[in-house]
Image (tube, rainbow, N blue to C red):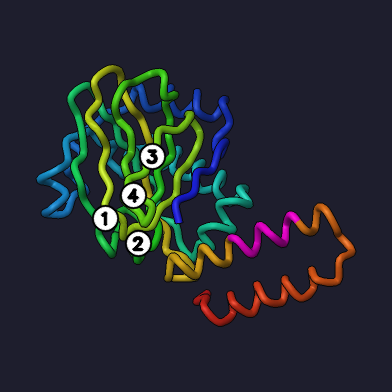
Amino acid sequence: MLLKIPGVLTPEQVDHFRSRLEKANWVDGNITSGYQSAKAKYNEQLPDTTAESRELGEAILVALSRSPLFMSAALPKQVFPPLFNRYREGMTFGNHVDSAIRSHGPTGVRIRTDISATLFLCSPSEYDGGELLVEDTYGVQGIKLEAGSLVLYPATSVHRVEPITRGVRLASFFWIQSMVREDAQRALLFDLDMAIIRLTADRPDDPALVSLTGVYNNLLRMWGTP
């Protein structure tokens, strides 16, 4: 399931993030690359030990916890501490699949990467190129969202970032280990949850709500690992 979630960060938060990141010391993005990724990756990254990385990463985690859409879609068991990258003109990241297991040295967090996430920190008008291209069952999907918006997609997907031809692209990226490991099962639960929410708004006294909510919870009980 590929899902776009607008407005995870407010415009004021985006401005604060941009101010902090402009003053940060960026390094070669291959500090977190595996062998295959390193051959395709050409960007810059904020070291995860910096004050900026810790502060802004914690702010993202708080914002995610306040997003019902994120919680419903990801069913997060654990979220990897958010990282930050920067693409300047000529930079790119070729086709790759994210590592199955990620470890975060400063915190000791170690997760299975079920879901990949990119949180955009620049408006599409600020740069040319830089689209995130994700291969899924419907073909290649191109994603270039407004600042503060998030995209989730299966970590098993082949994906890439197109070369930047003008401007700068800033983003945060991270992974989620879900309580429900299989993407197809998460997609069914998400669709069911959204249907329950719509029915609750339109017909709050409909007795079918009790049955549908029971089905949702029993499926989550069957598939989920808390």
* Rendered position, 207 above or below 127: below
Q: Earlier in the sequence, mark 4 or mark 2?
A: 2
The three-letter code of the residue at mark 1 reads Asp
Identify the residue at image location x=51%, y=63%. 187
Judged from the image, the secondary structure of the residue bearing numbered disc 1 is loop
Q: Which label was assigned to residue 81?
A: none
Tag 4–tag 2 contact (CB < 8 Å): no
Q: CA distance from mark 1 to mark 2?
A: 8 Å
Q: Residue furthest right?
A: 205
Judged from the image, the secondary structure of the residue bearing numbered disc 4 is strand
Tag 3–tag 2 contact (CB < 8 Å): no
Q: Earlier in the sequence, mark 4 or mark 1?
A: 1
Query: What secondary structure do most residues of the magenta stretch adopt?
Result: helix
Select label 4 or label 2 by which is in front. 4
Residue for badge 3: 172
Residue 33, image x, y percentages? 18, 49
